[in-house]
């Protein structure tokens, strides 16, 4: 018996992605992640830094997952464009960045993570993605293997659950 998928419009699907991102970016989640990574939240700037890095990393994770699962490139790109617009309107200070400039800066960050995923070196590409995240968050790569493993675990869980959610929908 074939699984029945839920029909959903591109805009509704983008809202699902936005909701998924928003759940990962709550104050509680960010603080929990900061503790797990031994990232000190002493001043407001510290929270802003980890929030911004998780914003980029989680958006990249969503794009990465969609690119792997959604074969119709035109439809996928339309959904991701709507998603990015929602993120910009919901999280970005438009006085600081125009949408176009923000997308350019985000694209450059996505390239960093995509390049890390291409590294064919032990133990696996996720190690290099975690290393990139580690460097972006702390300014340099912390040599703590547990930080690397926590980042890999968070990414793996985020993507595996997102994959299951995405596969429930039939985007029309």
Image: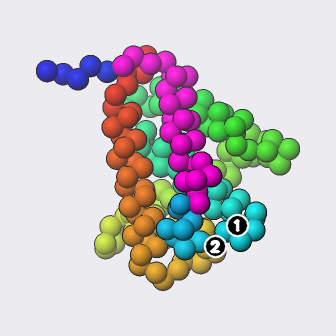
- The relative height of residue 155 versus residue 97 in the rendered view (above or below) is below
Where does the magenta region start and end? Answer: 6-31
Name the residue at the right extreme.
95
Whether residue 42 is visible, yes or no, is yes
User: What is the spatial separation of the Cα atoms under label 1 and label 2, in whole angstroms?
Assistant: 7 Å
How packed mark 2 is, by other alpha carbons closer than 10 Å (few <14, some 14-19, many 20 or more), is few
Quarter of the figure with the C terminus? top left
| Residue that label 2 marks | 40
Q: Residue 123: where, in percent of width, then height?
A: 31, 72
Residue 45 quadrant:
bottom right
Identity of the residue furthest to the bottom in this view: 143
Q: Quadrant of the N terminus?
A: top left
**Residue 134, visible in the rendered structure:** no
Does the stretch in magenta take in 25? yes
Q: Do the residues bearing badges 1 and 2 touch, measured as CB atoms within 8 Å? A: yes
State yes or no: residue 14 in magenta.
yes
Residue 66, position in %: x, y?
43, 39
Q: Is residue 136 above or below residue 57?
A: below
How many C-alpha atoms fall within 10 Å of the one at disc 1: few (<14), some, or many (≥20)? some
Compare residues 148 and 103 and report the one nearer the observer.
148
Instruction: Choose the circle earlier in sequence order: 1 or 2.
Output: 2
As helix, strand or loop, the secondary structure at mark 2 comes to loop
- At 49% from the left and 26% from the top, the residue drawn is 13
Is residue 18 toward the left or the right of residue 164 in the image?
right
> Which mark, residue 170?
none
- What residue is rendered at 40% in x and 28% in y? 72
**In the structure shown, which secondary structural element does the residue marked by tag 1 occupy?**
helix
Q: Main secondary structure of the magenta part?
A: helix
Snapshot quadrant of residue 69: top left
- What residue sits right under mark 1 in the picture? 46
Image location (x, y in percent) of residue 31:
59, 60
């Amino acid at each position: 018996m074939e699984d029945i998928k839920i029909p959903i419009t591109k805009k509704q699907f983008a809202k699902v992605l936005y909701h998924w991102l928003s759940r990962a970016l709550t104050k509680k989640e960010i603080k929990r992640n900061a503790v797990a990574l031994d990232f000190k939240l002493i001043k407001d700037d510290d929270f802003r830094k980890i929030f911004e890095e998780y914003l980029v990393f989680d958006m990249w994770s969503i794009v990465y997952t969609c690119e792997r699962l959604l074969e119709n490139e035109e439809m996928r790109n339309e959904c991701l464009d709507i998603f990015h617009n929602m993120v910009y309107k919901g999280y970005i200070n438009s006085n600081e960045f125009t949408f176009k400039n923000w997308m350019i800066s985000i694209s450059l960050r996505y390239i960093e993570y995509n390049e890390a995923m291409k590294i064919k070196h032990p133990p696996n590409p996720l190690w290099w993605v975690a290393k990139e995240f580690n460097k972006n968050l702390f300014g340099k790569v912390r040599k703590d293997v547990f930080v690397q493993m926590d980042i890999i675990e968070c990414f793996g869980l985020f993507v595996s659950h997102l994959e299951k959610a995405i596969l429930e929908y039939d985007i029309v």
